[in-house]
Image: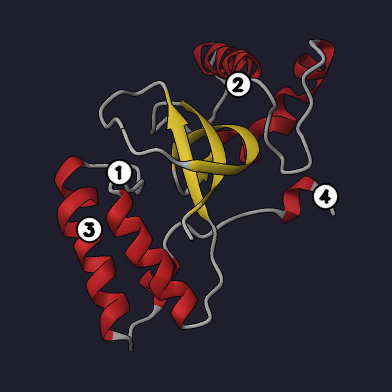
Amino acid sequence: MSAHNFGYRAWPLSDLTNDDIAISLTNDADDNWFGKYNMQHIMPDLNYTKIYFNYCNSINLHVKALLFESLNNTFVINDILEISETLGFDCIGTVYHSYLLTEFSDFKHELQEKNIFPNKYGLLNKLEDVITFIKLRKNAIASGINLEDFWEEMPVRINVINLA
C-alpha cells in the first residue's frame, strides 16, 4: 500500500445527521472548543475524547484516537497518555489540510538530496525534516511560486493513543 492510500477523518460523527448523540457530541466540540478558540479541530479534553471514542465504538464505527503534538503551547495536556504507535511528523495548515501530503512532490528532489523521504504513512520521521520542508516551502512562496498560503505551517507529530 502506498503512502497516499492513508488518510483520516478527524471527526467521523459530524456526518451522522440522524443520530442525536452524534449531533450533540459534534455540537459540544464546536461550541466548547473549535468555535471558541478558533482551533484546528484538535480536542484538548481527554474526558470528552474518551466519550467520543467510546460512542463511536458502541455504534460499530471503529476509530483510533490520534494525538497531535506541536510546538504551539496554547493548550497543554497534562494527562498521562499511552502511545501505541508513532505515525510520524506532518506539516499541517489545519487538521483537514496536510501541506506535506499535497506538496511533498513539489519539493521531492530537494528533500531527497537531503535524504528526506516519507515513511509508509506519507509522513516524515523527524521534526527536523518537517522544518526543512517548511523552509523550502516558504522560500518557494517568497520567490513567487503559487502555493496555498492561507494557514501558517504547523509541524506536528502524530501518534495513535490507547483510550481503552
For the residue labelled by badge 2, is the local secondary structure a helix, a strand or a loop? helix
* Precedes in sequence: disc 3 or disc 4: 4
Which residue is the site of mark 1?
Answer: 44
Q: What's the CA distance linking mark 3 and mark 4?
A: 34 Å
* Precedes in sequence: disc 1 or disc 4: 4
Q: Which mark is residue 98?
A: none
Q: Is residue 127 above or below residue 158?
A: above
Counting other residues with Cα less than 10 Å from the Cα at mark 3, is it few (<14), some (14-19), or many (20 or more)?
some
The residue nearer to you, when weighing 45 against 144, is 45
Name the residue rendered at 59%, 16% in the picture.
140
Which residue is the site of mark 3?
Answer: 30
* Left or right: where 51 falls relative to 161: left
Q: What's the CA distance linking mark 1 and mark 4?
A: 31 Å
Q: Is residue 56 above or below residue 121?
A: below
Name the residue rendered at 71%, 28% in the picture.
106
Mark 4 residue type: Ser
Q: What's the CA distance linking mark 3 and mark 1?
A: 13 Å
* Precedes in sequence: disc 3 or disc 1: 3
Which residue is the site of mark 2?
Answer: 130
Which residue is the site of mark 4?
Answer: 2
* Precedes in sequence: disc 2 or disc 3: 3
Mark 3 residue type: Asp
* Precedes in sequence: disc 2 or disc 4: 4
Q: What's the CA distance linking mark 2 and mark 3?
A: 29 Å
* Left or right: where 124 falls relative to 91: right
The reply to whether the C-beta atoms of the residues labelled 1 and 4 are less than 8 Å apart is no
